[in-house]
Image (tube, grey):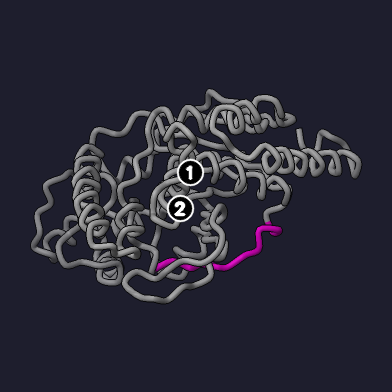
């Protein structure tokens, strides 16, 4: 879910080619959940194999990652660890939202409302432990690194980018900026068009970059105050302040030099410790127990998982593997295979 500060941010559209040769830290849960929500059949149902097992996450992960590899982009997949105890409320709220969406989905199906069927079906997506395990298995078979974060994946990636181990953080959520990532990259694994909520209008989805430093300079604040804005409009660790959106939040943090003053001004006494949430973002939980290594794709393991286990098209999978391998070989011919590995 993340924090709703997008309207305040300085975004710049880019071409994927601009990221060629770069190692990118991927907020894996965020991206895989996105695949589950968006990669669906015409009736809104997720893609499934012959045994009724969901495969939308594998479809997105394989073909979208292949697209990045063909552009010489090197993704490093970082997975969430144990959720912070303050996320319990958020998890409970998400369960309620999904349950409500399931009820609305059933009603939409009874009434044959196709657009609503698709909308509510997307809202019922659940990322299971089995799906996470399959995702890791596929990523490793592609020769790409996986890293397990102690807590939030975007927090781990933010530190890796700050340390120069990755060029940017790939995520749809803006939390990575609160965690301090110097560069957030959005829509990197998204293709096509997106329907505007409540309107019959579709817009092109373009990759975009958001630099933390440029954003802070434009807003005239520091990172601490960006975190305050996040707290005011709501994060995964706290409910939002009533009747306060991003623009009002910006005005408040620019007007006052302490969060206590903001509390007095809003006349809202929060039922959470804002200092604790501030610390989560300023001192992110981070692991240094990992290696970033790239290997040749394991053709047989990919085919076993996708074709033999989940009924993917053998021809399409093999063609995709061939394209990835050819790109790696081309890089080796141009310089040295060390450029990739």
Q: Is residue 71 magenta?
A: no
Residue 153, quarter of the rendered image: top left
**Residue nearer the viewer, 77 or 6:** 77
Q: Residue 324: x, y in percent?
A: 74, 41
Q: Is residue 189 above or below residue 87?
A: below
Q: Earlier in the sequence, mark 2 or mark 1?
A: 2
Q: What residue is pinned by disc 1?
A: 56
Residue placed at 42% from the left, 46% from the top? 46
Residue placed at 47% from the left, 48% from the top? 35
Q: Residue 68: x, y in percent?
A: 66, 49
**Which image quadrant: the C terminus?**
top right
Q: Residue 115: x, y in percent?
A: 34, 65
Instruction: Judge the density around disc 1: few (<14), some (14-19), many (≥20) Cα neighbours within 10 Å.
Output: many
Residue 138, quarter of the rendered image: top right
Q: What residue is pinned by disc 2?
A: 41
Residue placed at 54% from the left, 39% from the top? 160
Q: Viewed as shown, does residue 329 lie left or right of 206? A: right
| Magenta segment boundaries in residue numbering | 8-18
Can residue 258 be seen here? The reply is no
Query: Is the Cβ of the residue at disc 2 closer than 8 Å to that at disc 1?
Result: no
Q: Residue 271: x, y in percent?
A: 11, 47
Q: Is residue 15 magenta?
A: yes
Q: How many marks?
A: 2
């Amino acid at each position: 879910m993340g924090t709703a500060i997008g309207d305040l941010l300085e975004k710049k559209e880019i071409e994927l080619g601009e990221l060629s040769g770069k190692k990118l830290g991927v907020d894996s849960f965020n991206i895989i959940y996105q695949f589950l929500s968006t990669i669906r059949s015409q009736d809104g149902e997720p893609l499934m194999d012959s045994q009724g097992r969901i495969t939308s996450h594998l479809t997105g992960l394989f073909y979208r990652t292949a697209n990045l590899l063909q552009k010489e982009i090197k993704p490093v997949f970082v997975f969430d660890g144990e959720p912070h105890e303050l996320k319990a409320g958020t998890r409970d709220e998400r369960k309620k939202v999904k349950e409500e969406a399931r009820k609305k989905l059933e009603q939409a199906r009874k009434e044959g409302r196709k657009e609503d069927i698709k909308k509510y079906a997307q809202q019922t997506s659940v990322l299971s432990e089995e799906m996470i395990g399959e995702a890791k298995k596929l990523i490793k078979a592609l020769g790409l690194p996986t890293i397990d974060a102690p807590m939030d994946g975007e927090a781990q990636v933010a530190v890796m980018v700050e340390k120069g181990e990755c060029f940017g953080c790939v995520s749809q959520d803006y939390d990575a900026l609160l965690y301090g990532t110097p560069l957030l990259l959005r829509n990197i694994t998204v293709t096509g068009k997106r329907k505007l909520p409540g309107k019959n209008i579709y817009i092109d989805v373009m990759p975009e970059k958001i630099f933390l430093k440029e954003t802070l300079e434009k807003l005239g604040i520091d990172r601490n105050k960006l975190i305050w804005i996040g707290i005011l409009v709501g994060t995964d660790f706290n409910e939002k302040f009533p009747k306060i959106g991003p623009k009002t939040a910006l005005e408040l943090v620019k007007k006052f030099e302490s969060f206590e003053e903001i509390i007095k001004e809003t006349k809202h006494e929060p039922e959470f410790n804002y200092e604790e949430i501030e610390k989560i973002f300023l001192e992110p939980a981070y692991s240094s127990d990992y290696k970033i290594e790239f290997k040749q794709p394991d053709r047989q393991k990919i085919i076993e998982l996708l074709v033999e286990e989940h009924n993917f098209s053998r021809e399409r999978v093999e063609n995709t593997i061939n394209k990835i391998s050819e790109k790696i070989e081309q890089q080796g011919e141009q310089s040295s295979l060390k450029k990739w590995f």
